Image: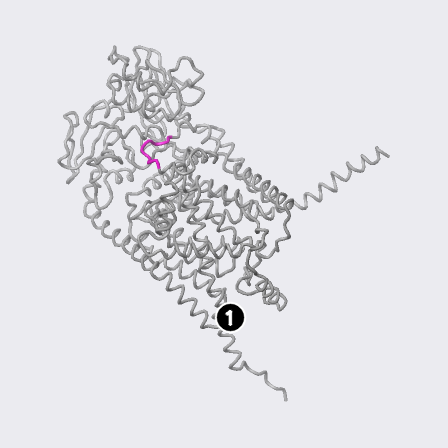
């Protein structure tokens, strides 16, 4: 009689139960599910409430809509013209645009099933919710075990700062800044650095590293810059070849005993059951000075190759950006800390007080950062533990900025153009890694003992540390949701009047709309003119109406000048073609601002202007650098020259210094102050004009040599055709486009057309990626073929000749 197989006894079931509850994989899954689930639940009002808000998300929505229109018209959607904001801007010529183009392509590809505003809300919601997975995946690529990487995901979304553009919710949510491009880059930068580091160590994986680094760069140029600078410093990372002064031999003996007994798959083993980690599994050889230098040089060569590949992929953006850098504005309205950061005293004080990670709450995360730093120092022999220390230290030092380092900071490439206050992102990334290491320490200790009670103790300790943090974050997101709902109710109550106003404005002849100009240094009536919680100025921008005023961007030279708009001077309305004024009841304007219609509490006015074109003269010619442009333009705007249509020409760049006909732009303030203001005889008439999204046409009758000025931001990509013949354009004060015309009747067409160079570089960049993949897949086979079919016959031929 055959005996039945014995079933599992009680002891086996208990051991199975214990192993199940102490499995690092299970713990990691539970932790990540909690972290992501917390975000998905509490951030859901970001998509449930249909409101764009008034933060930078308005600008990103307009950028996406501009890309959509370019795709539909068959134009270059990587460099379209956005004509409704700030006298017009070449949106993607100076600004990273992967997020906007991606959303636009999906919108067009799905035939508009998903509205753009909804897509921006959903992508913000999903990317912000899934950020813990980005940290988890990246730390795994660096070689950390599942417990450490899971703890990184647990703390990834918990950072709180006083609105300094870091990794916290406030940078992205409705109640925050709406930094949509930065959100994409925040998600992409950690895996980009991790895969880039693998290339430095192993010399393989160029395709994915190039793809992610290029995507990071095209999502946020500064984050791409930071990724490469981080990789540059990581080329020097090696285990420190010296012994600590205290005796650690007993620890080494214990580890050796564990290896002999086959217990090297414990909780500190980063390989675990989920796969190989070459960074962790490859033992570090005994280092000599020569081997260290050789290894560092090898890594630098790989980094240089990676930099060249990413530059090739993104050259369509980087090359035109560099060529036209003189037309990229460095705003005078930005605070000094944006470019120079805060200095070591403020940064270190903020770190100690908890303001960099735990603003206005108990500094739980800050304590974890310091604990993680100590643990990494104690484990200096393992290369992966040096990575968080180096990332955190590097960016903390650079976050001090020019205020601390002075001229030394200029050793950084492009240091004068960097917004160094955003280096807080590197501090946060390094801090998250250190927090993860600190939180994982008790978990690894507990799991190694294979007892449920130890794991329960580790869970209790983690809960004790993080529960107040999660409670605070829940409170903030609840307040964000409640504010959104309340503002939406207020918005709905006032929408009928605004909707009628918008319809009226679309029916009127073309012209720009003035609804005030908010500034940083003084209060204006615009600041309190809102419907719900969103300013009327923002609502007008959302509608895609052509607006006067600097609010969301400072990319072009004309953006700063608009802050000086004088509501009392007709020539300013005419200069900017501010044909319509929207203001609340009770706001007083000069007599030439005529009431047109009232929509509830919103009043619509009209001003007689000459339109988008004017015939002007130019008796002054200046040349210089962009740093001198705003003082000159603001002085010109305050003078009497705009009223008599005298617009000096301006040539930007170093080449202007070689032209003897040009006066230095730096001297323009004094020259303009002494310039004679005279009306002169009539120059002619603009008979008619046509306004397109990225083109303007006019029929002009000219009586004497004049410049036809288009009241749109100048850029070298604007092409002018006069009577069918292509004609050069010039830049006129305060940053507009001018075309020289002789006496007579003329038909003039101006169009924004990107250079052919951009399309050529774009095609080459797109082809670079598959070539990298092909080279990696077939590299070894090609090397063997080349050695056999080329090198071999050549060597044989040489041997026969010598024989």
Q: Does any portion of residue 518 appear in the rendered image? A: yes
Which percent across, then down, holds residue 422?
A: 39, 42
Dot 1 corresponds to which residue?
449
The magenta stretch is 329-336
Which percent across, then down, holds residue 509?
A: 24, 29
The quadrant of the image that shows the N terminus is bottom right
Measured along the vertical axis of the image, is residue 88 above or below residue 16? above
Which percent across, then down, holds residue 532?
A: 21, 46
Q: Residue 662 lies in magenta, yes or no?
A: no
Q: Nearer the viewer, residue 623 or 595?
A: 623
Query: What residue lies at 33% left-to-right and 51% top-to-bottom?
Result: 359
Residue 180 in the figure: left or right of residue 146: left
Dominant SS of magenta comes to: loop
Which percent across, then down, holds residue 551?
A: 29, 36
> Within the image, what quadrant is residue 179 found in?
top left
The secondary structure type at the circle numbered 1 is loop
């Amino acid at each position: 009689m055959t005996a039945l197989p014995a079933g599992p006894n009680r002891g086996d079931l208990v051991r199975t139960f214990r192993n199940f509850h102490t499995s690092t994989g299970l713990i990691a899954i539970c932790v990540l599910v909690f972290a992501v689930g917390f975000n998905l639940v509490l951030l859901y009002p970001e998509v449930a409430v249909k409101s764009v808000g008034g933060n930078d998300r308005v600008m990103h929505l307009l950028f996406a809509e501009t890309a959509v229109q370019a795709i539909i018209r068959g134009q270059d959607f990587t460099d379209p013209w956005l004509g409704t904001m700030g006298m017009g801007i070449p949106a993607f010529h100076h600004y990273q645009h992967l997020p906007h183009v991606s959303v636009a392509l999906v919108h067009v590809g799905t035939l508009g099933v998903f509205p753009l505003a909804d897509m921006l809300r959903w992508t913000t919601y999903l990317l912000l919710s899934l950020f813990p997975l980005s940290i988890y995946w990246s730390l795994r690529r660096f070689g950390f075990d599942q417990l450490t990487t899971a703890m990184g995901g647990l703390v990834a979304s918990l950072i709180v700062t006083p609105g300094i553009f870091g990794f916290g919710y406030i940078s992205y949510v409705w109640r925050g800044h709406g930094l949509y491009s930065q959100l994409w880059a925040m998600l992409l930068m950690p895996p980009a650095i991790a895969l880039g580091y693998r290339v430095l160590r192993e010399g393989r994986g160029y395709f994915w590293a190039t793809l992610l680094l290029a995507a990071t760069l095209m999502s946020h140029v500064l984050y791409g810059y930071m990724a490469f600078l981080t990789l540059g410093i990581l080329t020097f990372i090696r285990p420190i070849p010296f012994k600590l002064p205290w005796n650690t031999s007993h620890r080494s003996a214990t580890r050796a005993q564990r290896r002999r007994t086959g217990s090297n798959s414990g909780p500190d083993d980063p390989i675990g059951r989920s796969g190989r980690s070459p960074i962790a599994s490859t033992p570090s050889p005994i280092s000599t000075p020569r081997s260290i230098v050789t290894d560092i040089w090898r890594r630098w060569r790989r980094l240089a190759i990676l930099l060249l590949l990413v530059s090739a992929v993104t050259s369509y953006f980087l090359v035109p950006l560099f060529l036209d850098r003189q037309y990229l504005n460095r705003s005078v309205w930005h605070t000094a800390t944006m470019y120079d950061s805060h200095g070591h005293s403020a940064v270190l004080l903020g770190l100690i007080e908890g303001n960099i990670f735990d603003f206005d709450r108990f500094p739980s995360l800050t304590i974890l950062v310091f604990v993680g730093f100590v643990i990494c120092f104690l484990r200096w022999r393992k290369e992966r533990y040096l990575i968080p220390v180096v990332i955190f230290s590097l960016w903390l030092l650079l976050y001090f900025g020019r205020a601390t380092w002075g001229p030394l900071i200029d050793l950084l490439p492009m240091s004068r153009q960097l917004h160094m206050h955003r280096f807080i992102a590197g501090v946060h990334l390094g801090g998250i890694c250190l927090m993860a290491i600190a939180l994982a320490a008790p978990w690894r200790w507990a799991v190694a003992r294979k007892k449920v009670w130890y794991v329960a103790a580790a869970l209790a300790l983690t809960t004790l540390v993080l529960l107040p943090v999660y409670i605070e974050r829940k409170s903030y997101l609840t307040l964000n949701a409640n504010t959104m709902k309340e503002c939406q109710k207020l918005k709905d109550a006032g929408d009928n009047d605004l909707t009628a106003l918008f319809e009226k404005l679309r029916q009127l002849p073309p012209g720009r709309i003035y609804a005030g100009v908010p500034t940083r240094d003084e209060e204006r009536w615009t600041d309190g003119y809102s419907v719900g919680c969103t300013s009327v100025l923002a609502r007008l921008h959302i509608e895609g109406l052509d607006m006067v005023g600097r609010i969301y961007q400072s990319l072009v030279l004309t953006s700063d000048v608009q802050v000086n708009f004088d509501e009392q001077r007709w020539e300013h309305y005419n200069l900017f073609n501010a044909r319509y004024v929207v203001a609340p009841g009770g706001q007083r304007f000069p007599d030439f601002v005529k009431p047109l219609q009232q929509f509830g509490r919103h009043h619509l006015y009209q001003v007689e202007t000459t339109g988008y074109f004017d015939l002007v003269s130019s008796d002054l010619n200046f040349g210089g650098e962009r740093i001198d442009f705003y003082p000159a333009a603001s002085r010109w705007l305050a003078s009497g020259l705009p009223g008599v249509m005298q617009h000096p020409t301006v040539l930007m760049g170093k080449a202007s210094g070689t032209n003897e006909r040009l006066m230095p732009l730096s001297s323009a303030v004094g020259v303009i102050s002494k310039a004679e203001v005279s009306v002169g005889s009539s120059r002619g008439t603009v008979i008619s004009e046509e306004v397109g999204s990225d083109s303007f046409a006019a029929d002009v009758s000219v009586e004497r040599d004049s410049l036809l000025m288009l009241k749109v931001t100048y850029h070298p990509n604007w092409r002018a055709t006069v009577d069918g013949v292509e004609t050069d354009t010039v830049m006129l004060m305060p940053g507009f486009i001018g075309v020289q015309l002789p006496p007579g009747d003329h038909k003039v067409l101006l169009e924004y057309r990107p250079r052919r160079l951009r399309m050529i570089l774009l095609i080459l960049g797109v082809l670079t990626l598959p070539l990298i993949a092909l080279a990696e897949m077939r590299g070894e086979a090609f090397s063997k073929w080349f050695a056999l079919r080329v090198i071999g016959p050549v060597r044989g031929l040489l041997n026969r000749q010598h024989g």
